[in-house]
Amino acid sequence: MIDSHAHLADPAFDADRADVIARARQAGLTAIVCIGESLSAADRAAIISTDHVGFVTYTAGVHPHDAASFEQSRDVAAIRAHVARGAVAVGECGLDYHYDHSPRDNQRAAFAAQLALAGELGAPVVVHTREAEPDTRAMVVEAGKAGVRGVLHCYTGSHDLAAAALEVGWYVSFSGIVTFRKWLDDALLRLVPDDRLLVESDAPYLAPVPFRGKRNEPAYVPRTIERLAQARGRSVDIVAEATTANARRLFGLATTRPPP
């Protein structure tokens, strides 16, 4: 199993990060993608990946919440340097019109710059979207038609947006939200083909049932896989194998198991 999206660089893990990673191994995970949702987080994520070579990889980007302070020449150069250093994707970036922590024009500009960079570098993109479907769809479809690949992470949106992203070669990832009692859209979980499905923790957020309300961690990903398997009418092994192969393909991860 691969956790395709975890914020291991978050201060929530400062006291026991090594133990969290050890528990993920014990739970059967073979890799974790550590998300650099800001340049400072990406700097920390790079160190974590160096400390756990072959098991933890990382990304670098600027989240829409921080788009107001995005400075294109400076930040694009920093993300480019991280990808040259070994970051496996650009992001987490995207659009968030729910919180609107940054003006929407700034969000669109920062997202467009990161999509363009991903296209230039041939790197995938990790995308956050919330209550911004028309703009997200337009920008993802345009990028996808230009050859950019990526993932809509922690997806809870419409069937239409998911289908549009899938049509241009993108992936869709689900988190522990699908285990919550309020989750009612199992049809969405079946919409995504086996070869485009990813699974994630989004740790330290969104712990799946029965850990809801606690700090989340990658070791809980099997709970989400079990729920996806149930909704899709597939075995847990099939879903685990498919999501692992997809994460390796999207992020260019090694196919060999990491050292203990």
Image (tube, rainbow, N blue to C red):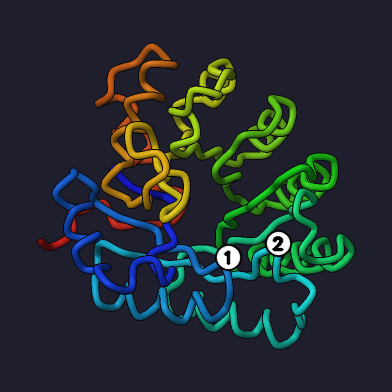
Q: Specify whether 37 is left or right of 141.
A: left
Tag 2: amino acid: Leu
Task: Name the outermost residue toward the bottom.
Answer: 74
Outermost residue, right side:
105
What kind of residue is marked 1?
A: Val
* Contact (Cβ within 8 Å) of mark 2 with mark 1: yes
Residue depicted at 47% across the width and 39% down the height? 175
Which residue appears at 55% of the width and 24% of the height? 182
Q: Secondary structure at mark 1?
A: strand
Q: Percent from the top left, x then y, of residue 137?
A: 78, 41
Residue shown at the point (84%, 40%) measured from the top left: 134
Looking at the image, the residue that sits furthest to the left is: 260
Which residue is most to the front? Answer: 213
User: Where does residue 179 sit, x and y in percent of width and height?
Assistant: 43, 28
Task: Name the image quarter holding the N terminus.
Answer: top left
Residue placed most toward the observer, 177 or 143: 177
In screen coordinates, is 164 left or right of 84? right
Q: Is residue 252 above or below residue 47?
A: above
Crowd tier of the residue under label 2, counting other residues whose Cα lies within 10 Å: few below 14, some 14–19, many 20 or above: many
What's the residue at 59%, 61% (across, down)?
92
- Residue 61 or residue 103, whichever sits in front: 103
Residue 246, visible in the rendered structure:
no
Would you name the residue on which mark 2 appears?
Answer: 115
Place of residue 254 in the rendered image (x, y in percent of width and height, measured from the top left): 29, 57
Precedes in sequence: disc 2 or disc 1: 1
Are there few (<14), some (14-19), or many (20+) residues within 10 Å of tag 1? many
Residue 21 seen: yes
Q: Quadrant for the C terminus, please.
A: bottom left
Q: Which residue is mark 1?
A: 90
- In the picture, residue 85 is in which quadrant? bottom left
